[in-house]
Amino acid sequence: MAQSDFLYPENPKRRQEVNRLHQQLLDCLSDSFQATNRLTGVLNIHLGCSLASIEMKRDGTIKENCDIIIQAIKKIQKELQEVDDALKDKLEPTLYRKLQDIKERETEKIAIVQKVIAVILGEATSAASAVAVKLVGSNITTGIINKLVTVLAQIGASLLGSIGVAVLGLGLDMIIRAILGAVEKTQLQAAIKSYETHLMEFKSASEKYHHAITEVTNTVKRQMR
């Protein structure tokens, strides 16, 4: 038992809690990597993009891994913006506005995109039109992706950003030292609060991101039947 534990008997329990919260954060990071790669695969196959998949940097920090996801998402957003610009250029203004209308039926939006997708991509498939509708013609999806980027940036800039993702392979005392660095162990409660605050937002953003991408892939599957 550390000397400070005699003065702060709750510290051992807090150490376990920091370890548990760190694992939850890594789980959310891993899910975001997987979801981003799923989205990359869909865009490469159906919209003719050439996006590279990403991998978690096991010997890196949380910030470094957040930045990897952020950069991948920015590349995805750039590709989607190019498709959006092409749709705006090729479609009549009234039809383009319908793509942005949340009240418009998805089947109608896909039919609209189908009119010009061949000109944009060089070929016309209902799956490509569905992807465009889900990712370009949806403010909801755009908002979800932007929210995830914001949360990842906040985590990277926080106390948690400098923590290595591989510390879970160490003993518990080593984990705490790696997590807290120069911070006094008496401040474990502050570390727990930081984890809890960021995890609440990250879990919510990550789940919505994962769900949105699942919707995209499910829609593609329906169109390909």
Image (tube, helix red, strand yellow):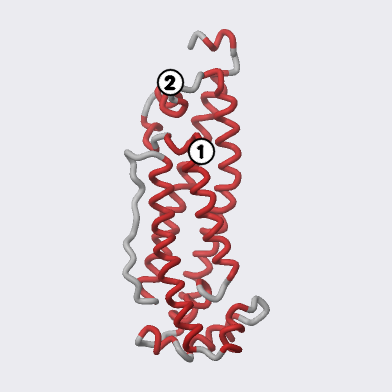
Q: Are marks 1 and 2 in contact (CB under 8 Å)?
A: no
Q: Is residue 5 left or right of residue 56?
A: right
Tell me the quarter of the picture where residue 191 sits: top right
Report how far apart the C-alphas of labels 1 and 2 lie in the structure: 22 Å
Q: Point out which mark residue 7 bears.
A: none
Q: Position of residue 11 (x, y in %)?
A: 56, 18
Q: Point out which mark residue 173 bears.
A: 2
Q: Earlier in the sequence, mark 1 or mark 2?
A: 1
Identify residue for label 1: 158
Quarter occupied by the C terminus: bottom left
Q: Considering the numbered disc 2 on the image, is that residue within a helix, a strand or a loop?
A: helix
Q: Position of residue 209 (x, y in %)?
A: 53, 59
Residue at 33% across / 59% down in the picture?
A: 53
Q: Considering the numbered disc 1 on the image, is that residue within a helix, a strand or a loop?
A: loop
Task: Give the camera-side residue of 219 and 197.
Answer: 197
Residue at 60% across / 67% down in the picture?
A: 140
Residue at 46% across / 51% down in the picture?
A: 31
Q: Is residue 101 left or right of residue 69?
A: right
The amino acid pointed to by label 2 is: Asp
Q: Which label lies toward us, 1 or 2?
A: 1
Q: Position of residue 138 (x, y in %)?
A: 57, 72
